[in-house]
Image (cartoon, rainbow, N blue to C red):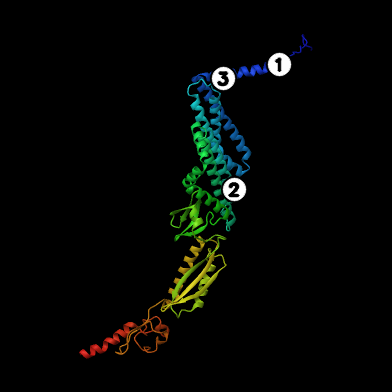
Amino acid sequence: MQPPYPPRRLSLPEADPATLMLSFDHFLDLAERPLGTWPGALVVLAISVAVAVGVHRVGARILVRIARPYPLMSVVLRYIDTPALILLIMLGIGFTIFEAPDTLPFIGALRDVETVALIVAITFLSARSAGAVGEAIVQAHPLDTDDNLNARRIHTQARVLARSVMVVIVIIGFGGALMAFPSVRQIGASLLASAGVAGLVAGIAARPVLGNLIAGLQIALSQPIRLDDVVVIQGEWGRVEEITGTYVSIRIWDQRRLIVPLQWFIENPFTNWTRNSSQIIGTVFLYVDYRMPLAPLREELERILAHAPEWDGRVQVLQVTDATDRAMQLRVLVSSFDSALNWDLRCRVREGLVSFVQAAYPHYLPRARADLSTDKDTHVDFAPPLERAGTAHAASTANTAADPVASRGEQTGPDPRAHAAASTAPASAEKT
């Protein structure tokens, strides 16, 4: 069935470029009319801020979905989310203020303030972007591994360099914000005229800041310390917890914090236990009697280390390192993957060996020997040679069942109490 009236073809007039330009200019003129008064300017300002917030929300959702499979990109987006919102709002406000007519009251001062605010927002976004890149690099190299030397090196470089870049960005932004004011520009021109004196004064005033900044770059490149390094500074043992742009925070074993300026690490010597590797050797010292056999101690040390999860299987040594007039000094060397495990291993070995000596060889613990004589021509001689032990006084009252050594049928030194009783016997006889 055909329509009663045939379709008619409509023809639109061709658009004239001059007419379109006039229409766009007319639209801009209509948009600028509300800016002539403060009420209209405030309305346009509110609309600009709302548009900036809307653009930020839509863009953030899109970028979050795109970055979801990429954890590092997600870290960067999380860091720059708030600075990006502030910058978009400042751009919306700046559009309103700079498009307002010059006849609007206080518009000149507001433009200066808006310029400074824009510079601050850009500086904030740039600094956070540098920090985001550093944090993304840090998260890409975790420290929870057995040998984390390379990860700690990357962490130190990323954090120190990122903070150094942030300091430079803040300094540049601060200078740009000051140069936004005409009076400050004149001061800057006068300073440039006397650049020698100004540079000398500025160098002296900024010496601590510049010194720490240069020290931070030196630490990032040469790396005398890294994050999580075990260091000994002025007798304090701790780990490098944080490296900032001006100082290093050392976490002491008792949870105190030692704050050390960056420049101190360049100018002073210190001990770094984990400079090349986290593996470490610890020492345990014991003092026993000269008659203590070493073979049972070495067997007990082997048994203790076989059941110790802190031992890495590299070093197991027991040696006599010193001999005093009363006892032998035994040094035990044991190794672990890191210093924290080595501390626990040293305590385990020390407790185990002391318990073993107490239980199996209690009479071989360090003791003081004395030889008391009743002869008038003989003086009291403390700590005599071991050859005297059990020769002149083999039949003394020291060799009784109460003496643990005598009960085993072994020769011992004289009992000071027996000699004291023998020396007092003649005196009592004379009195009677």
- Would residue 202 be seen by someone viewing this image from the given angle? yes
Q: CA distance from mark 1 to mark 3?
A: 24 Å
At label 2, counting other C-alpha atoms closer than 10 Å, the crowd grade (few under 14, some 14-19, many 20 or more) is some
- Please tell me which residue lies in front, 31 or 322: 31
On screen, 397 above or below 91? below
Q: Which mark is residue 16?
A: 1
Q: x, y (%) of residue 382?
A: 36, 82
Which kind of residue does numbered mark 2 sit on?
Ile
Seen as rendered, the residue at the extreme right is 2
Q: CA distance from mark 2 to mark 3?
A: 47 Å
Q: Residue at x 54, y 41 (%)?
A: 169
Q: Residue at x 50, y 77 (%)?
A: 294
Q: Is the C-beta separation of discs 1 and 3 under 8 Å?
A: no
Q: Which mark is residue 137?
A: 2
Instruction: Determine the secondary structure under disc 3.
Output: helix
Q: x, y (%) of residue 260?
A: 46, 53
Which kind of residue does numbered mark 1 sit on?
Asp
